[in-house]
Image (tube, rainbow, N blue to C red):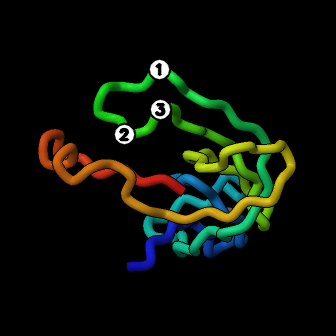
């Protein structure tokens, strides 16, 4: 199943927001359902990153990479990173997937995604 992360395009001025906003940041248009959901680009470049080494016991990895990526459309977003030797400015390709175990989801009733 193909998963997407969506941005929200103002129907009045075309400005694209991520994450969702109630009011357009550019034209301040405020009408219910006045945004179109548009999929975010998959490609971008790595702006910055860090690794978290002190993870909760239910994590199946020794460290967790977190990053900020500038997408092809200029938007920036945070996400988890699965790159062994990351370099700032390197091209990256994002994907969206469930990253926690099904048993954990049943226990806590949550689903986690990464991009
Ligand atoms: Zn607008």
* Left or right of 90, for residue 107: left
Looking at the image, the residue that sits furthest to the top is 54
Q: Residues within 10 Å of mark 1 (few under 14, many from 20)?
A: few
- Give the distance between the C-alpha atoms of the residues marked 2 and 3, in whole angstroms: 7 Å
- Where's residue 33, x and y in %? 45, 70
Q: Residues within 10 Å of mark 2 (few under 14, many from 20)?
A: few
Q: Nearer the viewer, residue 74 or 95?
A: 95
First of labels 1, 3 by sequence position: 1
Residue carrying label 3 = 62
What is the number of the mark on residue 54?
1
Q: Secondary structure at mark 2?
A: loop
- Give the distance between the C-alpha atoms of the residues marked 1 and 3, in whole angstroms: 8 Å
* Left or right of 46, for residue 58: left
What is the number of the mark on residue 41?
none
Residue carrying label 2 = 60
- Give the distance between the C-alpha atoms of the residues marked 1 and 2, in whole angstroms: 12 Å
């Amino acid at each position: 199943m193909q998963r997407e992360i969506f941005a929200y395009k103002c129907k009045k001025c075309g400005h694209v927001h991520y994450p969702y906003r109630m009011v357009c940041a550019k034209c301040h248009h405020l009408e219910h359902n006045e945004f179109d959901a548009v999929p975010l680009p998959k490609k971008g470049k790595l702006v910055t990153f860090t690794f978290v080494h002190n993870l909760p016991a239910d994590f199946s990895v020794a460290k967790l990479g977190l990053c900020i990526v500038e997408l092809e459309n200029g938007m920036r977003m945070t996400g988890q990173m699965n790159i062994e030797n990351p370099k700032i400015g390197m091209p990256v390709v994002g994907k969206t997937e469930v990253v926690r175990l099904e048993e954990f989801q049943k226990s806590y009733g949550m689903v986690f995604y990464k991009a």
